[in-house]
Image: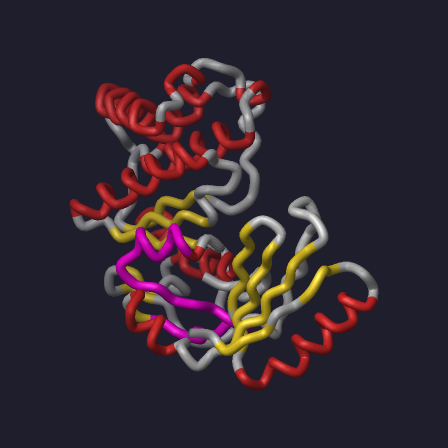
Amino acid sequence: MGHNGAGKTTLVHQIMGTLTPTSGNITLHGKTVQKFPKRARSLCSLQPQSEFQLGFLTPAQAVSTMGKMRGGDKKEVKQRMDMLFERLEIGKWAHTDGVKLSGGIRRLTVFCMALIQPGKLVILDEPTNDVDPTRRRYLWDVIRELTNDGTSVILVTHNVIEAEKAVDRLAILHKGQFAAKGTVPEVKRKVTDQKRLEINLLSIFDRHEDHDWSISTHRNGANVIYSLDESSVSTAIEWAEVRLKQGNILDYPYRQRR
């Protein structure tokens, strides 16, 4: 987890071997990614954060093609694809051209492409973007079941509540560094001395700003909560005061996190 620009997607690219770290080392199954980037990509399955354009491919065509490219048997790929579509309740769009699909169904299609022949490590970068609440629950169930056979999953998300329920371990990134990591209870204990700045936007349709002084950001409707460390408090309050005078926010209740 972490605010925009914290380094989450950059770390994903480094694990996949498509971006070289400036320092340090990443090891997958005993070999460094830097020396064996192709091997890393063969071991990993990725659902990228960026929008995937299906064009005129249907979900069935896109997912089955990915399964075959990753070496799956035609019959097994078909069976697993049908299972995923059924679990996520997207089967009725299986043969619909991608250009006619909603953003949520396209997102779920790309999720299935990552899971049709999962590698030893599955990386899901913001998998629930644009997905409706009902199918989000189905998606989390599929992810949990995926780990039952020993497959590892790295999940990148902004959704604090969903992540807390779904993950075994949590890491919060800030400026490319881990601000906290461990089990969910361990991380909660580590951040009890953090502060938080809440701002109330004028409307639920207003955009909020992400900042490098915020460790994490959570939004619920028109309410946005920035988690801060002690050194960032004055900067955050100055920013909020300016936005208040400009008429961009309603108010900014500030309190120590409990």
Based on the picture, tell me whether residue 175 belongs to the magenta stretch: yes
User: How far across and down, in percent of the image, does residue 227 sit?
Assistant: 52, 70
Residue 27 lies left or right of residue 204; in this view the side is left
Residue 50 lies left or right of residue 37; in this view the side is right
Name the residue: 37% across, 33% down: 112
Based on the picture, tell me whether residue 32 belongs to the magenta stretch: no
Using the image, determine if residue 169 lies above or below residue 140.
Answer: below
Name the residue: 55% across, 55% down: 219
User: How far across and down, in percent of the image, does residue 204 sit?
Assistant: 65, 47
- Can you tell which quarter of the image residue 116 is in? top left
Given residues 186 and 219, the one toward you in this image is 219
Using the image, determine if residue 205 lies above or below residue 134.
Answer: below
User: How far across and down, in percent of the image, does residue 63 sit?
Assistant: 39, 27
| Furthest-right residue in this view | 246
Query: In the image, which residues are magenta?
Result: 161-181
Using the image, determine if residue 24 lies above or below residue 168.
Answer: below
User: How far across and down, in percent of the image, does residue 22 sit?
Assistant: 52, 73
Way the structure is coloured: secondary structure
Given residues 117 and 111, the one toward you in this image is 111
**Is any atom of residue 24 visible in this view?**
yes
**Is any atom of residue 113 visible in this view?**
no
* Quarter of the image that includes the N terminus: bottom left
* Quarter of the image that includes the C terminus: bottom left
Residue 29 lies left or right of residue 235; in this view the side is left
Given residues 113 and 179, the one toward you in this image is 179
Name the residue: 61% across, 74% down: 213
Name the residue: 51% across, 47% down: 49
